[in-house]
Image: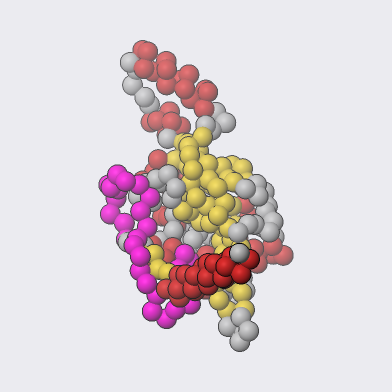
Amino acid sequence: MNEQVSHIDQLVTDAPGLAAQTEISAPGPVSRIARHYVSDLSKTEPFLPKRLLGFLLNLSYEDVTIVTCDPWKRNCGGVPRNSFVLVRLSVDKVSQDERSFCDRIIMVRITESVPTPVASEIQQTIFQIHKSQANVDPITNKEFQWSALKGKIVGTFYDKEDELSDVQIGFGLDVDTFFAPHCYEVFVPHANHLKQLINAFSEDPDPLEIGFLRYTETPSSHEADRVDIQVDPTDFIGKTMVTGRRCSEKRASGNQTR
């Protein structure tokens, strides 16, 4: 069995990782995106192991808690508040019967930082270090780099068939189920994948670009690819026409009752 190089191994120890990823069913557009995101550092392109942000500490129907560390955040170019991240069920941590769920993507918006379960002990240690002006040894320094983030679940992307049996991107504003938190991995999406997901529902062949995605007013120190936001102009035209018609109907109705 080949040893798998994991981010945990790189950061903390040289212990061997888990077995290699197992093939699952033929992919649709969401599946193809999901399968790029693996945590095995031995995987090369088109896989994106360096987009790993962390793992789940807690998961509910509404929100998640993510355990992360400075090296992972640095590899991803930082994690600003309100940024989108992708949560995927790890193929290596579920049974064969559950692997179809690995081709779904839960989108989460980062809302805030939260304490880790050992935050109080870490703070006590940092206080003593500052108090005594002591030098931090490498092992302790690694322990200090762990942190946790809170995120709000936006919804779930999945593959769905249309009337012509073509597989399209589907989206639901919730999660249909969830597994143990340790089975999930969290990634910062590549710009092309994020653009494909958030603009998937514009039916116009020539959509209108209204701007680009920007999480913070402060410019990022990391040069990231631009994610354009596209809309279907007919959505606005339709709503304006409906609103105008309703207003006219109300005025006409008012005139009749007077």
Instruction: Give the quarter of the image for residue 224.
Output: bottom left
Q: Which residues are magenta?
A: 196-225
Q: Position of residue 79 (x, y in %)?
A: 40, 46
Please indicate, yes or no, whether residue 110 appears anywhere in the rendered image: yes
Name the residue at 52% across, 27% down: 119
Q: Position of residue 160 (x, y in %)?
A: 61, 74
Q: Main secondary structure of the magenta part?
A: loop
- The residue lying toward the viewer, choosing from 97 and 202, is 202
Q: Position of residue 180 (x, y in %)?
A: 67, 48
Q: Residue 87: say if magenta.
A: no
Name the residue at 40% across, 61% down: 190
Q: Residue 197: say if magenta.
A: yes
In the displayed structure, would residue 147 be above or below residue 244?
above
Q: Position of residue 157 (x, y in %)?
A: 57, 64
In the displayed structure, would residue 82 be above or below residue 42?
above
Name the residue at 48% across, 66% down: 197
Name the residue at 48% across, 39% down: 112
Please indicate, yes or no, whether residue 21 appears anywhere in the rendered image: no
Assign the C terminus to one quadrant of the image: bottom right
